[in-house]
Amino acid sequence: MGVEIRVEGLTKSFGRQVIWQDVSLSIPAGEISVLLGPSGTGKSVFLKSLVGLLKPDRGHIYIGDRDLPYLPEHQLYETRKLFGVLFQDGALFGSMNLFDNIAFPLREHTRKTEAEVKRIVLEKMDLVGLMGAEGKLPGEISGGMKKRAGLARALVLDPEILLVDEPDSGLDPVRTAFLNQVFIDLSAQLDCTFLIVTHDINTARTVPDNIGLLYQRHLAMFGPREMLLSSEEPVVRQFLNASKVGPIGMSEEKDASELEAEAKMGLDSGKLPPIPPQQMPSNGLVRRGQHAPGAWCAAHGVTPPPGSFIDELGRNWVDEWPRYVASMQAGQAAGAAGITPPGGFPPPAPGPGGAGYR
Amino acid sequence: MTTDGITPGGIGGSSPSGRSTSRRARRAGGGGGGSAALRKISDGAVNVAVKEPGRFFALCLDTFRAIFRWPFQWREFIEQSWFIVSVTVIPTMLVAIPFGGILSLQVGGLIRQLGAQSYTGATAVVAIVREASPLVTSLLVAGAAGSAMCADIGSRKIREEIDAMEVLGINPLHRLVVPRMFACAFIALFLNGLVSVVGLVGGYVFNVMLQNGTPGAYLASFNAIAQLPDLLQAEFKAFVFGITAGLVAAYKGLNAKGGPKGVGDAVNQTVVITFMLLFVENFIISTLYFQFVPSKGM
C-alpha cells in the first residue's frame, strides 16, 4: 500500500507570473510529508497540480509509473481514484447531507449494496468523530466539522495517497491536535502516502517524516524532518522556528542592508531549539514509514540541538524507541498494554481481537 | 549533505544571487509605466479576441463528447428542468402578454391605414410565431435560466466542489453541464410554445377589445400567411438558444474565480454574452430560413 510520488522539474505560471519553477522531489511511499511555505508561494497550486486539476507548464509528476500531466483524460480519472483529497473548506456538495456526501464516491465507483455503503460510511464518520450528524447539510455545520466530513469522504475509497490542504486553517489548536492524531493513526492503519500542506509550525515539527519548504518560487529544501529541524539554512531555520529574524520579510524578502543589520546585532546566531519527538499512533500500531528518532542525525553525523527527542514526561525517545516498538509488537501479539507514546494519547486497551483500530 | 529523499540543488532558490536578480526584475517591471499599460491592453485584447472564444469552443467540444458517455444523468436533468421552469414560466407569461398587445397595437394601426383590417390576425400570428416568441424566449432563457445556472455552477466552483468532483473521478461536464444544457433546451421548446399562445391570446384581446377588430376576422385570417415551418423554425431557434445559454452559463460558471464577487461577475457576463450570442444566432437562423423556405403564396 502507498504509492510514491515523484516530481521532476515542475514549473507553473499564471500568465507572466511564475508560481514556482524546477520543483523536484520525491514523496516516499507510506510516509507523511509536510509542505510548508509563506503565504502565496503556491502550496495549494502545487497540491492541485499533483491531482491534475492544474496542468504544469513543464515537468513531470510520476504516480507509480504514470506521468500524470500527460495522461489522456480517461486514464487521468482512473489515476485519481488512487487519491483522497481534503480541500481547505472540505468542499462538500452543498445540496447533499453529510451521509450522501460521504457515500458519494462509493455510489459512483463501486457496486456495493446500500447496506454495505451505510456500514462503510458510518465507520468512517465514527473515525472522524461525526457520529449522529449524518442528516445535517454542509451549510448547517461548523468549519471543523466540514473538514472532518471532507476527510471522511476522502477516506471511503481507501486511497493510496492522501493530500490534505491546510487542515489547521480556521480550526482551534485542540481540534488541530486531534486531527493531527487522526492523520497519524490513519497513516498507521492504511499505510498510505500523506502530503499535508500547512502553515502550522507545530504540525510541521511533530507530525511528518519529511518536510518540504517552498520559498521564492523554488523548493528551498525537502528532506527528512530531522534534517530540516537541525538545518542552519537561514530560510528553513526562520520558517520552522516562526521567527522574525531571517531572510523572509513581511511582504517579500528583506533587503541586504536589513539582513546585515540583523547579523550585526547577533540576532541570527542563536541556538536552534530542540527537535521534538515525533507524534506516534494512538491505536497501538507502529507506522511502517516512521523512522527511529535520531536515526537521520546519527547516520549523517549531525548533533541534534540539546534537549532533542525528549517528551513532556522527560523520556528520551532515542533510548525509548526500541522498547516502544517491542512493547507495541508484543501488545499486538499478546494483548499487553504498551508504553504511552509522546503526545499523551494512551494506546487503547487491547480487546480480544488484538489492538486494531477502535 | 546528501541523503535519499533530498533533491539535488534544491537549495539554490534561496541563494543571495537568485534573490537579488528576482528583485531587480520586479523593480524593472514596475518602473516602465507606459509600456506596461500598453502590454496590459494588448493582453486584454488577445484574451477577448482569441483566448476566451478558444476556451469556450474547447468546452463546447468537451461537452459534446460528454453527451455520449453513459449513463445519462436523468435525475439531474429532470430536477434542473423543473428548476428552470420554476424560474422562467411566470416571467415569460408576464412578458408575453404585453408583447402580444404591443404588436397588435403597432401592426394593427399600420394595417388599418393600409386598409387590410381583415389580415390583422394573419400579421399578428406571423410576427409572434416567427420572431417575437423566439426573441422573448431568448430573453428569458438568458436572463433567468442562464443566470441562475451560472450562479449555481459558479458558487460550486468557488466552494471547490467542482475540483472535489474531479478528484473523486467524476467529470463535471458529464455530471453537471450536459443535463443542464439539455434541460435548458428542452424547457426553451416549451417556453417558445407558451410565448406563442400567450402572445396570441394577448394580441387577440387587445385587437378585439381596444382596436374594435372583429373576432371573426382575427381568427379567419389566422393561417393566411403563417405556415407550419414558421413554428418549426421557431422551435429550432428555441432549442439552439437553450443549448447556447446552457453552454455559456456553464463556461462562465466553471471559470468563476475570486470569491463571491467572482460569481457575481460571471453571472453578469453570462447574461450579456448570452444575449449577444442569441441575437446573432436569431439573425443567422432567420436569414437562412428565408433563404431556404419559400413564403406562403396568398
Image (cartoon, rainbow, N blue to C red):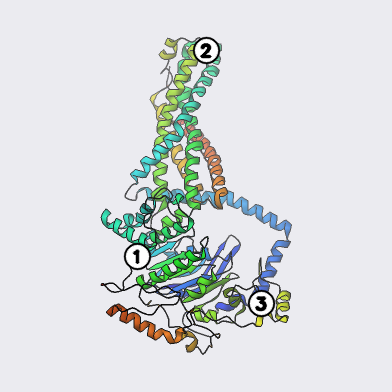
Q: Which residue is mark 3?
A: B17
User: What residue is shown at x 50% (from left), y 16% (from top)?
Assistant: B206
The answer for which chain carries disc 2 is: B
Q: Residue furthest bottom?
A: A301
Question: How many residues crowd mark 3 within 10 Å: few (<14), some (14–19), many (20+)?
Answer: few
User: What residue is shown at x 43% (from left), y 37% (from top)?
Assistant: B84
Question: How many residues crowd mark 2 within 10 Å: few (<14), some (14–19), many (20+)?
Answer: few
Point out the frontmost of discs 2 and 1: 1
Q: Is residue B188 visible?
A: yes
Same chain for the residues under marks 3 and 2 in the image: yes
**Which SS class for mark 1?**
loop
> Where, quadrant-wise, is the C terminus of chain B in this rendering?
top left
Q: Say above or below: B128 vs B236.
A: above
Same chain for the residues under marks 2 and 1 in the image: no
**Which SS class for mark 2?**
helix
Q: Is residue A63 visible?
A: no
**Which SS class for mark 3?**
helix
Q: Depth check: A290 or A213 in front?
A: A290
Q: Which residue is mark 1?
A: A158
The answer for which chain carries disc 3 is: B
Q: Which residue is mark 2?
A: B210
* Number of numbered discs on residues: 3
